[in-house]
Image (cartoon, rainbow, N blue to C red):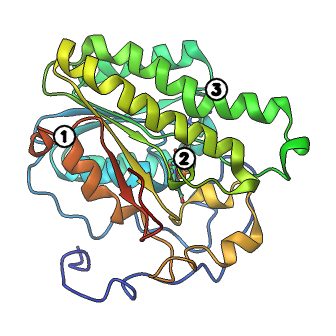
Amino acid sequence: MSDSLYVMQDPRDQYPGPPKKSEIQSAPATQQKMSEKPDCGETSYKGSGRLAGRKALLTGADSGIGRAAAIAFAREGADVAIGYLPNEQEDAEEVAKLVRAAGRNAVLLPGDISQENVCLKLVKDAVAELGSLDILVNNAGRMGKTEGLLDTTTERFDSLMKTNIYSFFWITKAAVPHMKPGSSIINTTSVQGYDPTPTIFDYAMTKAAIANFTKGLSQPLMEEYGIRINAVAPGPIWTPLQEANGDKKKLETLGGKTPFKRPGQPVELAPVYVLLASQEGSYITGEIYGVTGGMGSVA
Ligand code: NAD
Ligand code: MG
């Protein structure tokens, strides 16, 4: 296990610049097929019992940001249910292996969450396999790109809304009755929700909706159930999502506009998910935490 995350150093040089080698994959892109692998904490994240005994369900936990959160949760002592698409089986199995190596239980739950019945089954199976549910991370999402308003098909628009927003609603609604006071819900939004790029304006809409969903539910979820709900807003992070029906030019300059001049790595988000999941975040709800590489305010 390396100390790289814990040694004081210049954060501009801590990870590589924009990827030198990238490929456009059809969605969902996998980590297995990436030439330059993202750092999800596999050899670096060290736990200290901050989530001992907790039971967590994370969507999109096979790769990227969700994988980094899953590895960190397991090393902090949580059992982890991993949601993913069936054709990401190999990525998901790698995560399960890492979770088990941390001495925790890993549950693999493939399924397309753009469908309500799959979302309901996901929560039901996670509760049955884990025994209970204390942490829900709504993280799965799809992006791709569009050539503008007139080029945007109803099919793409529908799929983005179903995958990126409806699933959050369906899964959260199904999960809350199982979660006891002290539980935590964390939603992955984006800086795009605040500062949309034209070629992904429709994706950006879904991320704005997630931020609003988080704020809108924070009061009733605390008052009625003692559950906190927060969101994380990443900036440009090196993950398979960037390669999935992506934009080669954007890939070659990813993170170049940040003052770091590099993209973020998924592991750089993991400590924020852990804070929000743990009891250390006891007075934090309805907040949007930016991990944007300095790409602006998300409040
Ligand atoms: P990723 O491709 O590794 O993760 C996205 C995951 O979503 C996939 O692994 C897949 O399992 C899941 N998914 C997509 N469609 C699904 C469906 N229909 N059913 C079930 N699962 C589905 O990429 P990532 O960047 O780690 O993405 C995680 C989240 O972070 C997404 O919500 C994304 O919008 C958000 N985000 C990413 C960035 C970035 O720069 N990478 C920036 C801001 C926000
Ligand atoms: Mg994936």
Q: Which mark is residue 284?
A: 1
Residue type indicated by callout 1: Ile
Q: Earlier in the sequence, mark 3 or mark 1?
A: 3
Give the label, 2 or 3, closer to the camera: 2
- Circle 2 Cα neighbour tier, 10 Å, few/some/many (<14 / 14–19 / ≥20): many
**Residue drawn 40% across the image and 15% down it:** 173
Tell me residue 90's x, y (percent): 54, 49
Q: Is residue 174 left or right of residue 159?
A: left
Q: In whole angstroms, how far apart are the C-alphas of marks 2 and 3?
A: 17 Å
Is the residue 94 above or below the residue 185 in the image? below
Report the quarter where the N terminus lies. bottom left
- Circle 1 Cα neighbour tier, 10 Å, few/some/many (<14 / 14–19 / ≥20): some
Helix, strand or loop at label 1? It is: loop
Residue type indicated by callout 3: Lys
**Which residue corresponds to mark 3?**
162
Give the label, 3 or 1, closer to the camera: 1
Quarter where residue 195 is shown: bottom right
Instruction: Tell me, yes or no, whether the two marked residues, 3 and 1, touch with CB atoms within 8 Å.
Output: no
**Residue drawn 58% across the image and 60% down it:** 32
- Does any portion of residue 191 appear in the rendered image? yes
- Circle 3 Cα neighbour tier, 10 Å, few/some/many (<14 / 14–19 / ≥20): many
Q: Which mark is residue 193?
A: 2
Between 144 and 75, the one lying in front of the other is 144
Answer yes or no: disc 3 within 8 Å of ligand 1: yes
- Does any portion of residue 124 appear in the rendered image? no
Tell me residue 141's x, y (percent): 57, 41
Residue type indicated by callout 2: Gly
Instruction: Tell me, yes or no, whether the two marked residues, 1 and 2, touch with CB atoms within 8 Å.
Output: no
Quarter where residue 249 is shown: bottom right
Q: Is residue 167 left or right of residue 50?
A: right
